[in-house]
Image (spheres, helix red, strand yellow):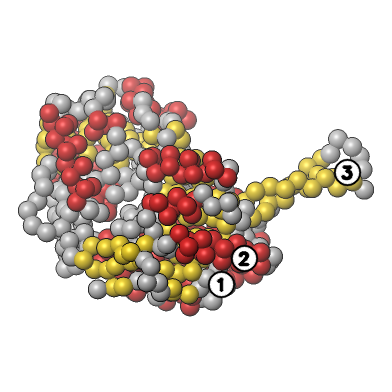
């Protein structure tokens, strides 16, 4: 069993004051690690270390900071097996998927390192002839990064790489469900020679997290998580008017038109729904299928979902793995039961398997209505409700009749239909004839309750900056 230590000022810190947080393998329910719940004093120490380090870090040239990030990316790849092993055990992912996540994390680190020579300000014309207006981009200071359980390695670097290249320092709070991979990354940070205090990693209780987020020296809080967690962060940010960047819930609609490649659409929608057992912010969460192809497409969904086996991925990497914990599985199953009670037809799945592990089968529901909980609330599991529509205007109205607006999907071979949906969909991302994948150079940002700010690309990098206007009279 692993015994981890918090990472403060480039050292793994031992403390007799800490209570311990248990970490379980969701595929076996076996206790695999204990991590320390940081004390308020340790949390404050991490913020002080980040504050002190930021004074020097921001004064480095951006190309120097980029060099550190390139070395970090190289070391992530060098230690990908160690990170992957930790992630696979705590998440139930296959070793291959977990190791690949470390490689993807290195890729996005390199992407942000390459912004070193591209962080631009502006020169703005003044109203007077002997004056220039210079708009500069500057670091914010200390950033608190709150990391989710579903893709904890990738999101760790997705958050810290743009923060570091722009001159900030970071205090990272990983999910208590998947903290071991974060400490494996901390070892990589140490090995890569990132200066002391620039990145700090601590596991903690919600109460200590509140103390961290409301600390007066914290300038920004970035979160990937639920709407409820986002509301908490907004409350925390009000204390010191800290900046917030929030990627919250999603309920991706997929519209399937009669002229679509139905085999491809069904295969990709099911693949999206079953990836990481549906624990993916942009996974397809509801399918709107044209009435002319409804029966045919439901049959294709059924075939593809039925072929997906689930269980431990140690010996069967092609299987769908477990949900994060027992509460998540129970909540999802109860949502399915309520949908059936409300008139949905259970076509496949919808049961809690016997034996160890928090597994749940691919589940297909038809005869669903727009007002059902299963259509309105994020499931975050391998459950797909299917609804029927008669024309694209109706499909758009149904897709937009929602609290969330993170990602969306349309399958059609008609470019007019595709552009109509792209222009009228109320979501931060529209994918045409494919399911979501968040390109590094894009901008992953939600509308409505799906968030504020965003990640990736130029605009995601600029989230970690603030502006200074210099009025130069000459």
Q: Secondary structure at mark 1?
A: loop
Q: Secondary structure at mark 2?
A: helix
**For residue 286, side relative to residue 464 (left or right):** left
Q: Is residue 139 above or below residue 452?
A: below
Is disc 2 surrounded by few (<14), some (14 to 19) or many (20+) residues within 10 Å?
some
**For residue 310, side relative to residue 40 (left or right):** left
Q: Residue at x 66, y 64 (%)?
A: 55
Residue 97: horizontal and vertical position, in percent? 30, 63
Residue assigned mark 3: 131
Residue assigned mark 1: 196
Q: Nearer the viewer, mark 2 or mark 3?
A: 2
Can you tell which mark lies on residue 52?
Answer: 2
Q: Secondary structure at mark 3?
A: strand
- Is residue 87 visible to us here? no
Residue 222: horizontal and vertical position, in percent? 49, 50
In this orientation, which residue lies closer to the viewer: 171 or 377? 171
Residue 160: horizontal and vertical position, in percent? 51, 60
Is disc 1 surrounded by few (<14), some (14 to 19) or many (20+) residues within 10 Å?
some
């Amino acid at each position: 069993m692993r015994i981890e230590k918090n990472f403060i000022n480039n050292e793994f810190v031992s403390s007799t004051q800490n209570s311990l947080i248990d970490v379980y393998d969701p595929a076996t329910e076996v206790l695999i690690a204990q991590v320390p719940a940081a004390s308020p004093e340790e949390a404050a120490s991490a913020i002080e270390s980040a504050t002190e380090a930021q004074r020097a870090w921001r004064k480095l040239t951006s190309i120097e900071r980029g060099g550190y990030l390139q070395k970090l990316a190289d070391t992530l790849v060098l230690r990908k097996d160690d990170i992957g092993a930790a992630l696979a055990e705590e998440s139930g992912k296959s070793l291959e998927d977990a190791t690949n996540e470390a490689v993807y994390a290195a890729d996005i680190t390199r992407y942000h390192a390459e912004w070193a020579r591209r962080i631009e300000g502006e020169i703005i014309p003044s109203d007077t002839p002997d004056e220039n207006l210079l708009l500069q981009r500057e670091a914010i200071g200390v950033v608190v990064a709150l990391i989710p359980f579903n893709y904890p390695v990738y999101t760790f670097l997705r958050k810290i790489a743009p923060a570091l290249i722009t001159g900030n320092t970071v205090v990272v709070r990983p999910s208590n469900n998947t903290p071991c991979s974060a400490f494996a990354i901390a070892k990589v940070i140490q090995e890569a020679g990132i200066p002391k205090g620039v990145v700090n990693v601590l596991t903690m209780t919600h109460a200590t997290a509140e103390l961290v987020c409301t600390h007066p020296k914290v300038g920004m809080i970035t979160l990937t998580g639920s709407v409820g967690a986002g509301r908490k962060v907004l409350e925390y940010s009000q204390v010191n008017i800290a900046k917030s960047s929030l990627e919250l819930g999603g309920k991706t609609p997929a519209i399937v038109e009669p002229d679509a490649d139905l085999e491809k659409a069904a295969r990709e929608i099911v693949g999206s729904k079953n990836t990481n057992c549906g624990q993916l912010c942009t996974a397809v969460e509801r399918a709107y299928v044209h009435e002319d192809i409804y029966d045919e497409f439901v049959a294709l969904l059924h075939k593809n979902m039925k072929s997906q086996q689930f269980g431990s991925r140690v010996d069967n990497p092609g299987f769908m793995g477990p949900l994060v914990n027992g509460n998540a599985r129970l909540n999802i199953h109860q949502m399915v039961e309520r949908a059936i009670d409300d008139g949905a037809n259970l076509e496949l799945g919808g049961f809690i398997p016997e034996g160890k592990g928090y597994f749940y089968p691919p589940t297909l529901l038809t005869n669903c209505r727009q007002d059902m909980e299963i259509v309105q609330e994020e499931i975050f599991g391998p459950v797909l409700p299917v609804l029927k529509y008669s024309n694209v205007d109706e499909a758009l109205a149904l897709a937009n009749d929602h609290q969330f607006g993170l990602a969306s999907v349309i399958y059609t071979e008609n470019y007019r239909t595709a552009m109509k949906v792209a222009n009228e969909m109320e979501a931060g991302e529209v994918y045409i004839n494919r399911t979501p994948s968040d390109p590094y150079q894009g901008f992953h940002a939600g509308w409505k309750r799906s968030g504020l700010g965003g990640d990736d690309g130029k605009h995601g990098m600029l989230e970690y900056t603030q502006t200074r206007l210099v009025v130069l009279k000459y």
